[in-house]
Amino acid sequence: MFDFAWPWVFAVLPLPWLIWRFLPAVSQQQAVLRVPFLADFEALQGRSIRTTGRSGLPLLVAVLAWVLLATAAARPQWQGEAIPLPMQGRDLMLAVDLSGSMAEEDFVIGRQRVDRLLATKIVAGNFIEKRQGDRVGLILFGQQAYLQAPLTYDLKTVKTLLEEAFINMAGQKTAIGDAIGLAIKRLREQKGEKVLILISDGENTAGEMDPLKAAELAAQENLKIYTIGIGADADADFFGMMRGRSALDEKTLTRIAEITGGRYFRARDTAQLMAIYDAIDAMEPVENEKRFFRPVKELFPWPLAVALMLSLGLLFRRQE
């Protein structure tokens, strides 16, 4: 779409005629500043500007040069098609436990038993796809916490990195406090709503930061934490030994959520895990307002270049 950024500049178009029409005549002998192409408005040498008649082609070229200069000053532009910009949403970090206990096969997907990590990948991957408009990052933690993906609108890459994660990738133990501390560090400089979704099936057994202390720091940074305890309930075997899950510290995970204004969820099977992500999605909706950007190409160099060439032509003609 063609447009002018400053169309009001065209108001100066009649300015030369107004000056010639209403200002007192000035002879060449009295002139302090000589502008070469103004002489083309004169019919004869030595006569005043007021007595100048039309001089044919040179006068027409001078008028055209003035119109082109005004056109260039009005900044003609070509605006391209509107391009949608990423919507302004939330900064959402996903922290996934990769400790050894995540290998427990107590989830069922499509009538097939799968381990906790695979169930998390499938359900969390679908959740990530729905977060269009949010910037999503990924933290993987075990004995240590690693930033696998910084905050980005590229949700496909975040989902791919989650799918490529494997158990014990970050060590066999669980450093919940360090995972929260890393999320605080990565989200500290961000403005707007900040959310951390932390998934774990155990208790804090490693790391340098206490989980509850980390939660207090998160609350000071306005970081809301949703915690998800994953894994089936423990069953007792024939000898009275507990089997079926690790020692899930629900008390700590609940307290972390309470301190930061979030919520604790318990996922004992795939259906519950899917329902949890749907609930979080409803509580942290994506911004739906769309914004657009129109690329603008400036066209003023073209009329400006033609005007300068016409002015130079008048100048050379006067010197002949």
Image (spheres, rainbow, N blue to C red):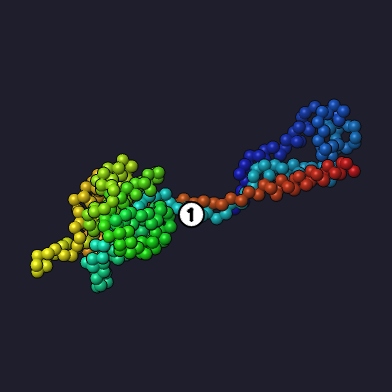
Residue 12 placement, left or right of 260: right
Residue closer to the observer: 264 or 29: 264
Taking depth in this image into account, of 13 and 257 the one nearest to the observer is 257
Residue wearing tag 1: 84
How far from the left and from the top, in percent, is residue 208?
Answer: 29, 48
Residue at 75%, 48% in the rendered image: 306
Q: Classify residue 97 by image quadrant.
A: bottom left
Residue 296 coordinates in the image, percent (x, y): 58, 50
Residue type (three-letter) at the residue carrying disc 1: Pro
| Residue 225 horizontal/vertical position (percent) | 29, 49
Report the side of 21 relative to 12 (left or right): right
Query: Residue at (86%, 33%) from the top-left corner?
Result: 51
- Residue 162 % position (x, y): 36, 61
- Does any portion of residue 9 appear in the rendered image? yes
The part of the image, by quadrant, that contains residue 115 is bottom left
The correct choice, above or below, for 194 with respect to 200 in the image is above
24 shown above or below 165: above
